[in-house]
Amino acid sequence: ASAYETVLVEKRDKVALIQLNRPKALNSINQQVIEDLNKAVLDANADNGIGAIVLTGSNRAFAAGADIKMMEPLSFSDTYMGGLFNDLENITKAKKPIIAAVNGFALGGGCELAMMCDFIYAGEKAKFGQPEITLGVLPGAGGTQRLTRSVGKSKAMEMCLTGNFIDAQEAKQIGLAAQVFPVDELVDRAVAVGQKIASFSKVAVALNKEAVNAAYETTLQLGLDYEKRLFYASFATKDQKEGMSAFREKRKPQFTDE
Ligand code: CAA
């Protein structure tokens, strides 16, 4: 039995596999999903035995967006005062990397959730889109911002203004997805990459993640300076000594995350 109503969590060696599980509504995102997802990510992030997180859905849908039936009656003040979908962003605070393994639909908030992860692997049948325009609204969880930074203005504008979906190959071609895998292999391949990441120093992994993310927030020179500070800081870790002495001694490093 799962500790959560709308997500399933499975520990596979050093990887936490978190699966959205609200099949009746194609994993559409309501408050319960946000709460469950945040708690599952927080728990995995705090677990010393876990080095990476894979977030997935079902073969039919990663997530078909925010829950439209939940949103329909809301007023401006409901959304504004309640900070609708603000909490979904909390998963981006995790130090440990999150890989999105997207099979099926990643639409609206589902595409936005995938983009909150550190990178995206797509199954061959995956479909990505920001169809909010068809509902008389616009993306509200990063679709106009993360998508534009990820794929550039022209493609992001086209997707937001038409609501058209793109397939897995196109998602890879434009840099939204890092790789495409057969549907049945996707989750295992993502978990295997997660295991590889989890074999490295957790501190080094977190520093790498933080530095790449800084590129999204700042100018080139400030980003380069930020990277240098983190790079220099990595020399304060035992894992730097271990990694480099293991190279010199031609043996496998034993990282202790210190
Ligand atoms: N919210 C609530 N329910 C949803 C849903 C959503 N986003 N997406 C699908 N469902 C429900 C359907 O209502 C349906 O339920 P019922 O059987 O009770 O009618 C069930 O899931 C299955 O869906 P369909 O019958 O529609 O399945 P399909 O295979 O014919 O179509 C689909 C699949 C193309 C994904 C279609 O369901 C669809 O277009 N969904 C909505 C996609 C969308 O517009 N997402 C953006 C939401 S807005 C948003 O996300 C705001 C934001 O930026 C934060």
Image: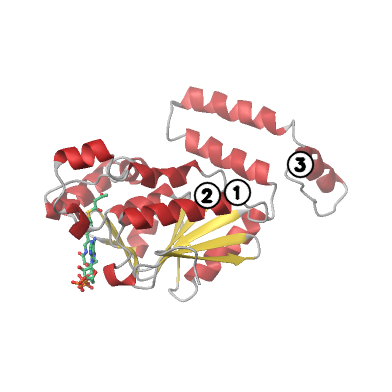
Q: Is mark 3 within 8 Å of ligand 1?
A: no
Q: Quadrant of the C terminus?
A: top right
Which residue sits at x=62%, y=45%?
Answer: 205
> Whole-Å distance between the Cαs marked 1 and 2?
6 Å
> Whole-Å distance between the Cαs marked 2 and 3?
24 Å
- Disc on res. 112: none
Q: Compared to 7, does 37 lie above or below?
A: above
> Whole-Å distance between the Cαs marked 1 and 3?
20 Å
- The picture quadrant for ligand 1 comes to bottom left
Question: N-terminal of the two: label 1 or label 3?
Answer: 1
Residue 190: horizontal and vertical position, in percent?
53, 63
- Disc on res. 46: 1
- Disc on res. 42: 2
Residue marked by disc 3: 239
Three-letter code, disc 1: Ala
Q: Is residue 227 left or right of residue 158?
A: right
Q: Secondary structure at mark 1?
A: helix
In this view, the residue in front, 101 or 64, is 64
The colour scheme is secondary structure
Three-letter code, disc 2: Leu
Q: Is residue 239 visible?
A: yes
